[in-house]
Amino acid sequence: MDFSTEEYINDLELIRQRSGELIHKANKQRMDELVREGLVGNGGTRNTIQRKKSSIASTASGAAASLALRTELKNCKSMATIIVGPTRTEFLLHTDLLTACSPFFAAALSGSFAEAESQTVALPEEAVPSFEYFAQWLYTRSLAHDTTNARGQPTYFVLLELYALADRLAVEGLRNAAVDRVAELAEQTNSVPTPSDTHILYDRIRDGAPMRRLVTDLFAFKKTDNLLETHRDNWNNKFLRDLVVTLKRPQKHALSRHALVEWKTRHGEKWTPYGCDVCKIPCQANRDWRCEECFRVFCRGCVIRGLSGCGWDWPKEGGCKPWLRDMCQYHEHGLTPSCHDEENKSGGKAAARVGSMP
């Protein structure tokens, strides 16, 4: 198929505009709820807000789905047949929902192609179980169910396969939801993906995908040394390479995970000099920076460069895990608005970030 036609571009722009408006409304609704609950607008609850960020990101997309279904489903008149897998399993889904979340389906079902005429799309290479999860998410915008086994252990492979499917179908919202769910399960169960999961991650998911960085961070920030050393199965070699690089190379997200503020002393308070956590040079209060949660200090030069690194005690810093600090860094927002858009528009002030430092 040729997806570069002028008609497709016009249709896609309209879809982006419509879906963006729905998500914007849902985000505003969620922020209003947080204000009423007292979680926003109170400086004394800043740490609570930070810990709520990942759940806010997840519930915003869920709220968007709820809003869209409640107000728009009655206007969805047409249905599309999606034929999946070698067994040719048929799914009958609302065309408007498919085209609103996926440029792939927008091009196939709304353009000048044969699929648009028949309202039928064949996906012979896709797995039926993964598409079932997609269909569930399409109507609920939730992955909260059926992502653990009978013993309550996370089935990361399901979410990784779903992420790969969402990539192929260009469903950005589902990719972000899958990332959120992996982080949520890892935190709830204090677990990480298995060796076989890392093969899915690197064999079936594209290079540069945010899901890879999240999984690498999970291993770097959790105490996984014994697991990596003693597990009887083999880890993916590319995954191990990326993990070593994460552990050894200073990088921006290692610094941005901290709640950095200017390190100031109160009147008459004595202070003890500390070494910068990155370059080890002595730091001074009223000049350098400190994390409000783990109390590590960083010199002005390292903060300006925006770099930090990994240490042996990363797993001890429970409040400074990057997925708790800011889940949006693992999202993609080409079609969906940034998780921080509403926070910026509302004028909310968060702790200092690398991008806003001198």
Image (cartoon, rainbow, N blue to C red):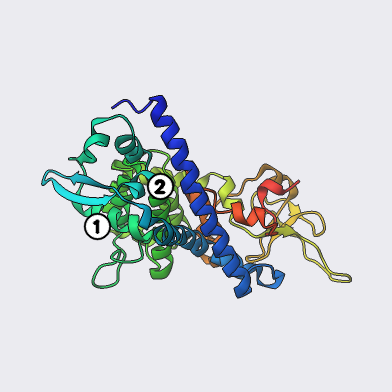
Query: Percent from the top left, x then y, of residue 199?
Result: 28, 47
Judge by depth and name the residue closer to the eye, 285 or 95: 95
Eyeballing the image, is 231 above or below 33? Answer: above
Image coordinates for residue 350, horizontal then vertical, percent: 67, 59
Q: Nearer the viewer, mark 1 or mark 2?
A: 2
Quote the CA–CA distance across marks 1 and 2.
Answer: 22 Å
Give the left or right position of residue 47, taking residue 131 as reference: right
Q: Name the residue tied to disc 1.
A: 232
Q: Amino acid at mark 1?
A: Arg
Q: Which mark is residue 285?
A: none
Left or right, 289 with respect to 37, comes to right
Residue pointed to by mark 2: 212
Residues 264 and 157: in front is: 157
| Residue 206 location, quadrant | top left
The kind of residue on which mark 2 rests is: Arg
The part of the image, by quadrant, that contains residue 297 is bottom right
Circle 1/circle 2 CB separation < 8 Å: no
Quadrant containing the N terminus is top left
Q: Secondary structure at mark 1?
A: loop
